Image: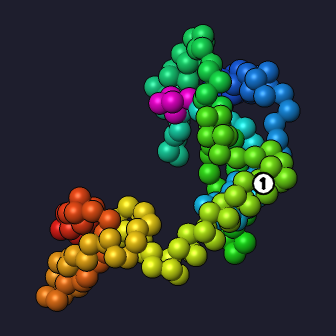
Amino acid sequence: MRTNLEKYNYYLNIIESKEHDFINIEIPNPPKILYKVSKDGTIIECIVEKLQYFRNNNYFDYNKKVYKDLVKKVKDYSETEHKLERNNIRFNIVEDRGTYKVSSSISLEMLDDYFLTKKCAEVVSEEYIKIVNEENEKLNNDYVRCERCRKLILESDALNVKMINFKMYGSKGCMMKFCSSECASHEQMSLEG
């Protein structure tokens, strides 16, 4: 190893090798596909691209050139025994949203929001669709949503409050429906910035 870049790559490879071995022990057979259900009942297929270890604040990125201090930092980190934690394993996924794709990284804790089989996702999807249909039925029959918290309330119980924001609504303001004066005041404060 002669150059700083060669030294850097050598020590980084040691670090990544330890992390890779840890991931393979903790999650020997990672799923290839996860399923996520949105609040409207749509099932989103998520492709697991790879598993990666998140090192908290220990990043070893460089800009164009590797200097001695970065090589020392990577070397020191590679030679120090670090306790690898299961919660730092990340699933790098790509969600197919039809017209576009979304890349993200999720932790093991966040896996509770995903399903391993499409059949499980379909069961939850049916429940969400049922809830959405019930809400739409209520909205068609004398119910409205609070503009702030989105709770369903009877139209007769709703507070009609004039929101004032000259930039958005001009001098006339805008009438909005709220479930409580607390929601109305919070909305007015958010409009004022």
For the N terminus, the quadrant is: top right
Q: Which residue is drawn at 85% across and 53% down?
A: 119
Asked which quadrant contains residue 155, the reply is bottom left
Q: Is residue 117 left or right of residue 177?
A: right
Asked which quadrant contains residue 122, the reply is bottom right
**Magenta span of residues:** 55-59
Q: Which residue is drawn at 72% across and 54% down?
A: 124
Q: Of residues 174 and 8, which is closer to you in this image? A: 174
Furthest toward the left, the residue is: 171
Q: Which residue is drawn at 56% across and 69% down?
A: 135
x, y percentage for residue 47?
77, 53
Q: Name the residue under label 1.
A: 123
Q: Which amino acid does label 1 sit on?
A: Val
Question: What is the chief secondary structure element of the magenta stretch?
Answer: loop
Q: Of residues 98 and 8, which is closer to you in this image? A: 98
Q: Is residue 131 left or right of residue 98?
A: left
Q: Of residues 54 and 193, which is closer to you in this image? A: 193
* Image height of 96 relative to 108, above or below: below
Q: Is residue 193 visible?
A: no
x, y percentage for residue 127?
70, 58
Asked which quadrant contains residue 92, the reply is top right
* Image height of 112 relative to 93, above or below: above
For the C terminus, the quadrant is: bottom left
Q: Please, what secondary structure does the residue beneath circle 1 have?
A: helix
Q: Can residue 62 be seen in this view?
A: yes
Q: In this view, does 69 lie to the left or right of 106?
A: left
Q: How many labels does the image show?
A: 1
x, y percentage for residue 167?
20, 81
Q: Residue at x 19, y 84 (%)?
A: 173
Q: Of residues 187 and 60, which is closer to you in this image? A: 187
10 Å neighbourhood of mark 1: few (<14), some, or many (≥20)? few
